[in-house]
């Protein structure tokens, strides 16, 4: 499987080629990974579902191990849901900080 090339190495190589040709380094806008709203939404859905599935799996495993009724399944599914929400909100908070930082960099 082919790996994606490192953009920083490619830029450095292009600058070296331009320098050897006698031109100065190429002026570029700063590049950053920009995710579409759909990609962000899917990421959040995956984080939520992953938390719930892990909670369900742990709860089911403990119920089987201890021979109890679905008490651990219910408890850990709720804990998994809460953990998924917490991770999802943390991701949203981080993306908001990144967007605010990039907006302030563009103004400067």
Image (cartoon, rainbow, N blue to C red):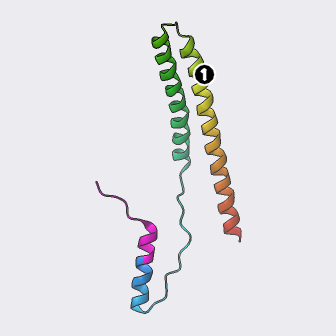
User: Splitting the image into 4 quarters, where does residue 13 fall?
Assistant: bottom left
Q: Position of residue 53 (x, y in %)?
A: 49, 26
In the picture as drawn, the residue positioned furthest to the front comes out as 66
Q: Position of residue 18 (x, y in %)?
A: 42, 85
The residue positioned 64% from the left and 35% from the top of the image is 86
Q: Please tell me which residue lies in front, 62 or 26.
A: 62
Dot 1, crowdedness within 10 Å: few (<14), some or many (≥20)? some
**Magenta segment range?**
1-12
In the picture as drawn, the residue positioned furthest to the bottom comes out as 22
Decide if residue 27 is on the left or right side of residue 7.
right
Q: Secondary structure at mark 1?
A: helix
Compared to 58, does 14 lie above or below?
below
Decide if residue 2 is on the left or right side of residue 77.
left
The residue singled out by tag 1 in the image is 78
The residue positioned 52% from the left and 42% from the top of the image is 43
The residue positioned 56% from the left and 39% from the top of the image is 44
Q: Please tell me which residue lies in front, 103 or 53.
A: 53
Compared to 43, does 24 lie above or below?
below
Q: Position of residue 10 (x, y in %)?
A: 41, 72
User: Splitting the image into 4 quarters, where does residue 87 fall?
Assistant: top right
Q: Position of residue 41 (x, y in %)?
A: 55, 41
């Amino acid at each position: 499987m082919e790996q994606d090339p490192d953009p920083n190495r490619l830029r450095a190589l292009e600058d070296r080629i331009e320098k050897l040709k006698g031109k100065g380094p190429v002026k570029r806008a700063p590049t950053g990974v920009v995710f579409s709203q759909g990609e962000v939404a899917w990421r959040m859905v995956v984080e939520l579902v992953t938390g719930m599935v892990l909670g369900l799996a742990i709860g089911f495993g403990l119920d089987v191990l201890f021979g109890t009724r679905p008490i651990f399944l219910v408890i850990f599914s709720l804990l998994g849901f809460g953990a998924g929400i917490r991770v999802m909100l943390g991701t949203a908070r981080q993306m908001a900080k990144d967007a605010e930082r990039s907006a302030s960099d563009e103004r400067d």
